[in-house]
Amino acid sequence: MTFAGYSLLPVLPELALAAGAMALLMLGAFRSGQTTQLVTGLAVAFLVITGALVLWLPGGKLTTFGGSFIVDDFARFLKILALLGSGVTLILSRAYLAEQAKLFEYAILVMLSTTGMMVLISAGDLIMLYLGLELMSLALYVVAASHRDDTKSTEAGLKYFVLGALSSGMLLYGASLIYGFTGTVSFAGIAAEAKSGNIGLVFGLVFLLAGLCFKVSAVPFHMWTPDVYEGAPTPVTAFFASAPKVAALAVFTRVALTAFPGIVPQWQQIVVFVSIASMALGSFAAIGQKNIKRLMAYSSIGHMGFALVGLAAGTQQGAQGVLVYIAIYVAMTLGTFSIILAMKRNGRAVETISDFAGLSRTNPLLAFFFAMFLFSLAGIPPLAGFFAKFYVFLAAIKAGLFTLAVIGVVTSVVGAFYYLTIVKVMYFDEPKEAMEPMRVELRVVLAVAGTFTILFFVYPAPLVNAAAAAAKSLF
């Protein structure tokens, strides 16, 4: 299977997903009547098929298009995680699509965005990186504003688009500087040329990493996150908080470790600063929040800071820590959003933290799971979130970044305050009117994510070993 002399086998999952999106677009456009549920169901099926194709590809390292597209264990691990995040998000979106949006295009945009994520994860040069990033982002801009009758949703989409365009410009400027000073766009070629901290190259690297920081919503490029999380429909917020973060952290890690291994001290300073700033802002800014989605936005900023602690180490163990962290983070986030989506009274979604008052008496099981997710996000043992932080802090300590690890632990303690505040509201405040019954798909996601989060310590080997193999393929 070749095209213009290049093997298309490594890019087969992306082609299949893009073709599936085009087919569903035709189905939605030409079939009369309401096709939203049908298209959404088929979209989930296509994501599952794409995941099977990723696993079916031959083992080892595959490349095509002159090395600009790479499939290795690192790419396989993160593609499966991104597909899982997108698929679960579509499942969580069923009620929203059935009752409010009735947009068959929503699932197609998620598929196209996921295609961009997969291209981004496999990027082997700056051009492929930009193509993947834009394919992912353009669909996200539209999804953020998908609730067209809602002013907040439209505002969220516009803010995300304007700031996203700015970050893309910064990233492109950085890429052009890197190309100018190295004479190549491939990561392997840049690694061969970038042996010393040339001032022009470092400038390019700063702009490139600034563009990537926007995508992971790291400080100081986080300003869009709380507004977009609050303004976008809740299923869209769940999507933003999971799959795109996987792709952005993947390319952040691949660029730093494979394109610039010769100038680790230069980019390490940037990552350490961004990590500390994100952990601090994520911990302190969330304390005064009243809206649960805004709180989750600041929580997300903080967690990206914690994940970058592993990258700052610049070692194989650090890369493994990043992968374990992002996998556990996706599970915790999707579980938390399954509960937020279930919070409805009299047919209306409720989003303020005070609405969770007395949940332990009106719905004890839901309150228990929510408390477990919040404890895990805070990093309290023996839940999965504790192990996520343990792996990145351990990598930082072994790399001699003691100050970074200590700041990480301190900000974890501060962050625990606002998670525990919600637990206090659920268990000690006077109960409000009971919530509506939870939909079946939300229960399934909650059960799976909750079981993984609570029982991860019993058998962590599969995830830890898969992350170790994925990290090894970068070095």
Image: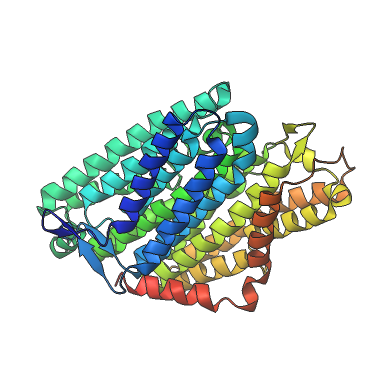
- Identify the residue shown where x is 48% and y is 62%: 404
Q: Nearer the viewer, residue 98 or 161?
A: 98
**Residue 167 versus residue 380 in the image, above or below:** above
**Residue 192 versus residue 28 in the image, above or below:** below
Tell me the quarter of the image containing the C terminus.
bottom left
- Identify the residue shown where x is 34% and y is 57%: 13
Residue 152 spot, x, y in % from top left? 57, 25
Q: Nearer the viewer, residue 436 or 196?
A: 436
- Identify the residue shown where x is 62% and y is 71%: 456
Tell me the quarter of the image containing the N terminus.
bottom left
Q: In the rendered image, is residue 275 in sight? A: no
Q: Nearer the viewer, residue 8 or 318?
A: 8
Residue 177 spot, x, y in % from top left? 17, 45
Q: Which image quadrant is residue 76 in?
A: bottom left
- Identify the residue shown where x is 45% and y is 65%: 323
Along the horizontal axis of the image, is 439 left or right of 113?
right
Along the horizontal axis of the image, is 380 left or right of 82?
right
Residue 472 spot, x, y in % from top left? 35, 74
